[in-house]
Image: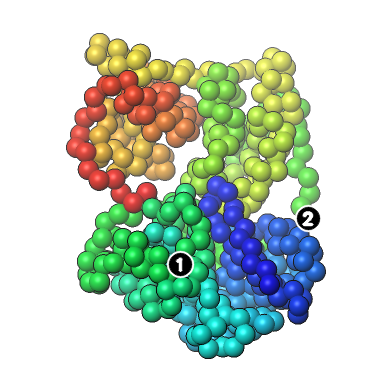
Amino acid sequence: MILETIRTEGLAALSYFLADTVEGVAAVIDPRRDVGVYLDLARAHGVRITDVFDTHVHADYLSGARELCTLTNAAVHVGPGAGLGFDAREHADGDLVRLGAFTLRVLHTPGHSPEHVSLVLSSGGHGAEGEWAVFTGDTLLNGEVGRPDLAESVDAEQGARQLFSSLRRLLALDDGLLVYPAHGHGSPCGGRIGVRDLTTIGYERVHNPLLSVEDEAEFTARLLAGLPPQPVYYARVKDLNTRGPGYLGTRPQVPWLDPRDFSEAIRHENAVVLDTREIEAWADAHVEGSLNIALRDAFPIWAGWMLAPRHDLYVILDSPDHERLVEEHLTRLGLEGVCGYLRGGMRAWVEAGLPIRSSHPMSVHDLRSALDAEDDLQLLDVRRDDEWQGGHLPRARHAFLGRLWQDLPGLSLDPERPLAVYCGSGYRSSMAASLLERQGFREVYNVLGSVTAWRAAGYPLEGQETEPARA
Ligand SMILES: [Fe+2]
């Protein structure tokens, strides 16, 4: 028997490869869209992928169920009412699916989404005595529960009540059952997911703060009070997963463009220059109008917030070695518009004598002096609402980065006057600085180290300290 966890970094998504090597069959649970990893595992273990399960219609990444089905002829299994636009078997509560010597029992666990199912795994017989693991999707995570605000057909409160009942059903399982969730630490699908990927029903019963709440109304109130912001790309990704993501197969190689060709290509209306270099490198010298999303762990989540499928993306990398990773990250979110990479990177652009722009980094000390001097500097905080409420810099305005586009007009900032932007560490504010430059702000400063450095320097924050939200 093989049970392997496949972690997708950045999205903190967990999928599972389950195989009976004696009978030569395997199942994949919650596959990601680039399915090579599962095909490699099947090859390595000499098994055939016969079944693919999606515990629910995912909102945060594109499922690989359809791709696997196309490549292997595997059956796709989903929960009741999933309504997918391609061939998939919808299961009712209590259905049993055989996989070699294993049985997966379908447990309908709505709340995160109406069609959500958990899968209880047993070896040998079908009785509860043989059950030893449960794949809980986004219903139960390590130390956290799923968010109930993503479904379209039910509101968040209704979803929370459904989740309450679903979690009771999971708690009725044996304490010793291993819990395999669909997300680990770092996913926006849950605010406070623990750092270990694996947990048990018994451990969650004792240590998961929301599972100890026995009153449905209190559970609902607590869950709804601490939800992280809902990423704008979730609705789009969910819709694509419902219709069925297009077949990836082997796609044509994206061209590497010489600086002159790159500079020509980026002139057209839909073009977006995506600069994935580190924030200091971007600040030093960049292509006018480029969007800086540095290739760190959170890259795919921010790419989801900031980019749209309609964009023709022209990408600048720190190193050609990052090409594959950037493309994987974007593909998993359905952002397939990469049209070209800058050959030779930013150095080649500079050496070709093409125009560059610099954005000045600012230290917290210089910022403090400017604020004390009451000079003309405008200050913008782009952290989440709960971070802002936990204390912010004096004289700052606030707009969460994910909503900066929409909220910018209401902030009454003057594009002709200097503007300093900060976040928690300088990463998100670099994205904001690049967005603001695109919007015509003439002099934008990214506050390096941002609130982390401000606190470390012993400078005071304004505003009330409250408990941060579950994000
Ligand atoms: Fe989900």
Mark identifier at residue 347: none
What is the spatial separation of the Cα atoms under label 2 and label 1, in whole angstroms?
A: 39 Å
Q: Which residue sits at x=76%, y=78%?
A: 22
User: Looking at the picture, how far across and down is residue 369, in whole percent?
Assistant: 30, 12
Mark identifier at residue 200: 1
Q: Which residue sits at x=65%, y=35%?
A: 315
Q: Residues within 10 Å of mark 2 (few under 14, many from 20)?
A: few
Res 245 visible: no
Horizontal relation, residue 345 to residue 370: left or right: right
Q: Which residue sits at x=74%, y=25%?
A: 344
The answer to whether mark 1 is within 8 Å of ligand 1 is no
User: Looking at the picture, how far across and down is residue 156, in whole percent?
Assistant: 33, 65
Q: Height in image: 359 above or below 82? A: above
Quarter of the image where the N terminus is located: bottom right
Residue placed most toward the observer, 369 or 19: 19
Occupied quadrant, residue 50: bottom right
Residue placed most toward the observer, 83 or 181: 181
Res 246 visible: yes
Residue placed most toward the observer, 19 or 314: 19
Query: Which mark is first along the chain, 1 or 2?
Result: 1
Q: Residues within 10 Å of mark 1 (few under 14, many from 20)?
A: some
Three-letter amino acid code at disc 1?
Answer: Thr
Of the two numbered discs 2 and 1 in the rendering, the one whose residue sits closer to the viewer: 1
Mark identifier at residue 250: 2
Occupied quadrant, residue 7: bottom right
In the image, farthest residue toward the left: 464
Task: Name the element at disc 2.
Answer: loop
Q: Which residue sits at x=67%, y=17%?
A: 350
Three-letter amino acid code at disc 2?
Answer: Thr
User: Looking at the picture, how far across and down is residue 394, in whole percent?
Assistant: 24, 25
The answer to whether mark 2 is within 8 Å of ligand 1 is no
